[in-house]
Image (cartoon, coloured by chain):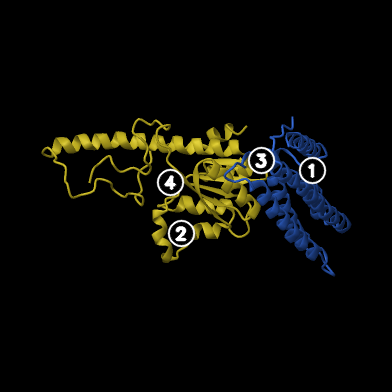
Amino acid sequence: MAVGEVMRMEIPSGGDMSVTSPELHVLAVDDSIVDRKVIERLLRISACKVTTVESGARALQYLGLDGDKGASGLKDLKVNLIVTDYSMPGLTGYDLLKKIKESSVFREIPVVIMSSENILPRIEQCLREGAEDFLLKPVKLADVKRIKELIMRNEAEDCKTLSHSNKRKLAEYIDDAPSPSPSPSSSTHDDSSAKDFPSSKQMKSADEKFSSLL
Amino acid sequence: MDALVAQLQMQYRNYTVSLYQQGFLDDQFTELKKLQDDASPDFVAEVLSLFFEDCVKLIGNMARALDQTGTVDFSQVGASVHQLKGSSSSVGAKRVKGLCITFKEYCEANNYEGCVRCLQQVDIEFKALQTKLQDMFNLEKQIIQAGGKVPQVDIN
């Protein structure tokens, strides 16, 4: 196993985004068929892979969080971002957000809330619960572009930090072990999609995030 | 051929601009057009088609909820109005959206007559938009059939 090879997304260590453009896989949740069609298109045109579902319950099912063991194989379908409507029958977007943040496997996935209503307490509540951002409907291309850049930037920071910490680990490894020879049989690419890496990304305080919306 | 294309394009431009000026469409419709390209040439038509289906469904729900002999569940009506407001907003159907705002207020005030009036208006309005857009899409087809390209219409 090669330390330093393991990354959630393939981003060059220099952090140069323009070289490779990794595709974000976005899970979009909305009970409105019209809005699902629009958000899907907005995301596709922004070079994202999209899966749309019509409810919070279906979202949890997709992620395998609904307690139904049968969905565990879906862990390989890495979701990099969840975009959800706030007002939905059954599980609201807020409920969904809470469930995701309560999950040890999925809490690192950024969640963006969409709503047609500009209700300040609602926005604050979502940000406090860990939402990455809040979009006012109707959603425009500029909104999606902004969100995508935000997510990509965060992912790059995570990877940079990862590669820094892994460089340290590698240095320690080299110090400890005799000179390593490459092993011809083993694959150096570790499938770590299911692993939970410690994220050094500081969660912005609600105030900090909130001020950008003013 | 070119003269015909030019004439059709001018017709198309004028017609589109008039839809905005008369308040049928707003900014969000322009946003939807941005999402249409050669790979997805019918995107706008597809979304609007879904929207009109949604209108039929939701208006049906509202009518049924308002038709209850005895007590009307205004929150039920309101829920459908809220959904229609959302989808009309998402496609740029300005007049429908505006009506939904008024409609919602009547629901919250438990105003039966107000609700019934709004329901009738919403029905008329979405059908009017449907007709207008059909005419617009037909003009697009004619332009393409005449060998031309559908022009980008600058609203401002």
Observer-nearest of B3 and B134 = B3
Disc 4, disc 2: CB below 8 Å?
no
Query: Looking at the image, which is closer to me, B20 or B83?
Result: B20
Residue B24 circle label: 1
Report the residue at 76% width, 49% height from top. B134
Q: Of discs 4 and 1, which sits in the foreground? A: 1
Amino acid at dot 4: Glu
Earlier sequence position, callout 4 versus callout 2? 2
Q: Which residue is mark 3?
A: B33
Q: Identify residue type, mark 1.
A: Phe
In the rendered structure, the residue with mark 4 lies on which chain? A
Check disc 2 and report the residue beneath it: A65
CA separation in Å, label 3 and label 1? 15 Å
Q: Residues within 10 Å of mark 2 (few under 14, many from 20)?
A: some
Name the quadrant of the C terminus of chain B.
top right
Identify the residue at image location x=57%, y=32%: A212
Q: Residues within 10 Å of mark 1 (few under 14, many from 20)?
A: many
Q: Is residue A156 left or right of residue B8?
A: left
Q: Nearer the viewer, mark 3 or mark 1?
A: 3
Q: Which mark is residue A108?
A: 4
Q: Residues within 10 Å of mark 3 (few under 14, many from 20)?
A: some
- Does B156 sit left or right of A168 as displayed? right
The answer to whether residue A183 is seen in the rendering is yes
Location of residue B67 with respect to B32 vertically, above or below? below
Q: In the picture, one chain is yellow; tell me its letter.
A: A
Residue at the outermost front position: B1
Q: Which residue is depicted at the point 50% across and 42% down? A: A47
Residue A124's spot in the image, x, y percent? 59, 41
Q: Which chain is blue?
A: B
